Amino acid sequence: MEHFTNYQQMIAPAMVWESIERNDAVKMAVSFSWKNEEWLIPAVYPFPGGLVVDVVRKLPFYHLKNRLTIYEKDKNAEYHSPLERLLMDRHDPFRFYPTGHLLAENYCIDEWDSKRFIWNPFKISPVPSKEDYQAKKLMEHYGLDLNTGWVIFRMCFKSEFLSFYDQELTLMLEAPDEPVPGPTLKIEEAGQLIVFQNPLTKKAEMITVTVLENGVIEHPFKKPGPVKYPANYVILHYRFHPEKKDQQYCLMDTRLTDAPIELEPCEGLTYAHTEEAEPCDPRFSKVTLRDYMAENRNRAAYSSLTHYPRLTTEWQFVAIHKERKNVRVKLKRD
C-alpha cells in the first residue's frame, strides 16, 4: 500500500477539512468509464469516523476546447431568458457536479460535504484556472497532464460505522438533474385547461390553471437604491391531469419584456420588507434548475420581475431528468 507523503503540506488546510489535514493519502488503483468519459480515483484519505475520496473527471483537449467555444459564443449573445441560461449552462464543461454515496454491506452513507478543483488549460471562461496554484499543484502531484482539462471532486463521508480498512466499500456517483424543454404555454386566466405534449414521453398531458394573479412590489427597503419600482410579477398555481408522481416538472417564465429586477439590498443596509418581497426569495433570484424545482414543488410558479404591468405571461413547460445513470465503483487499494 503506497502513501502520498507530504501531500497535505501542498494544499491549504482549509481545503481538506479539520482533522484529516495531517493524514497521508492512500493510493488507489481505480479507473472507470461514465458515459464514455474517463474517470479516476487516485487516492482516498481515511480519518477517524470518515473518509475523503478524490474523484477525477478527464476532459480531453479538443473536446474541452469545442465545449468552451460554444459556451463563449452563447454567453456573449444578448440577454438570455431563464431557460436559455439553463440550457446554455449545459455547454459549460465544468458545470457537471455529481453527488457521492458510499455503500457498505448493510448501509449507505450520503456525501457530507464536497469541494471541487478545476484545471482549465485554456484562458477561456468560465473557469480560467490556469494560474490557480492549488489546482495546479494537485494535478501535478497526481501526475495529470496539464495540457488536458481535469475536474477533481473531493467528497467527504462521515459516519461512526465507517472503517476504510475493515470494510469493502463502493462509491456510487449520482448525476445532477437536467432540464428538457417542452412547449410554451400561453396562460391567460384561472380555470384554463391546456393540452400539450410531454417532451420526455411524447404523450399528451393536461394542465389546469387554478390561480393566476398579478402582484406589485412598491419598494421593500427603507432607502432608495438603483432599482426601479414598482416591480410587477405574476403568481401562477396549476394542476396536472392525471397528477404525475414519478417524474419531476416545472414551469418557467419565458416572456421577459425587461431584464429581471434584483432585490438584493446593499451590504449593511437596514431594510423592512413585506412577505411578498423577501430579499432572497427564489421567486426573484431564479438562477439554477434546483430553484425552479423548489419553486414548483407545490405546483406554484412566479414570473420574473419587470418594470411594467403584465396581463398575460408565457410559460415554458420543462421536464426534469438525469442525463446519465448512476455509476458504482469499488474502492480497491493499490
Image (tube, grey):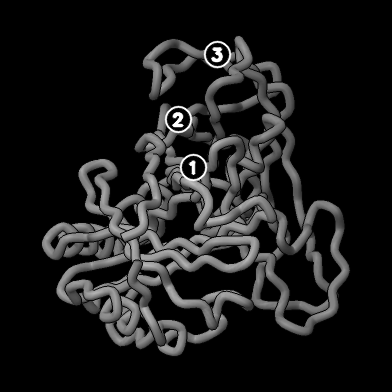
Instruction: Tell me the element at label 1.
Output: loop
In this rendering, the label closer to the viewer, 3 or 1: 3
Label 2–label 1 contact, CB within 8 A: yes
212 vs 147, left or right, is: right
Mark 1, other Cα within 10 Å: few <14 / some 14–19 / many ≥20: many
Q: In which quarter of the image is residue 33?
A: top left
Label 2–label 3 contact, CB within 8 A: no
- Which residue matches tag 3? 206
Question: Which disc number belongs to residue 254?
Answer: 1
Where residue 314 sits in the image (x, y, percent)?
52, 35
The amino acid type, in three-letter code, at marker 3 is: Met
- Which residue matches tag 2? 184
Where residue 142 sits in the image (x, y, percent)?
28, 74
Q: Which of 34 and 79 is in front in this view?
A: 34
The residue most toward the left is 62
Where residue 19 sits in the image (x, y, percent)?
62, 77
Mark 2, other Cα within 10 Å: few <14 / some 14–19 / many ≥20: some
Mark 3, other Cα within 10 Å: few <14 / some 14–19 / many ≥20: some
At horizontal 65% and vertical 47% (from top left) the residue drawn is: 309
Where residue 107 sits in the image (x, y, percent)?
61, 39
186 vs 69, left or right, is: right
With respect to residue 109, does 218 lie above or below?
A: below
At horizontal 30% and vertical 73% (from top left) the residue drawn is: 119
Instruction: Tell me the element at label 3.
Output: strand
Q: Nearer the viewer, residue 98 or 190?
A: 98
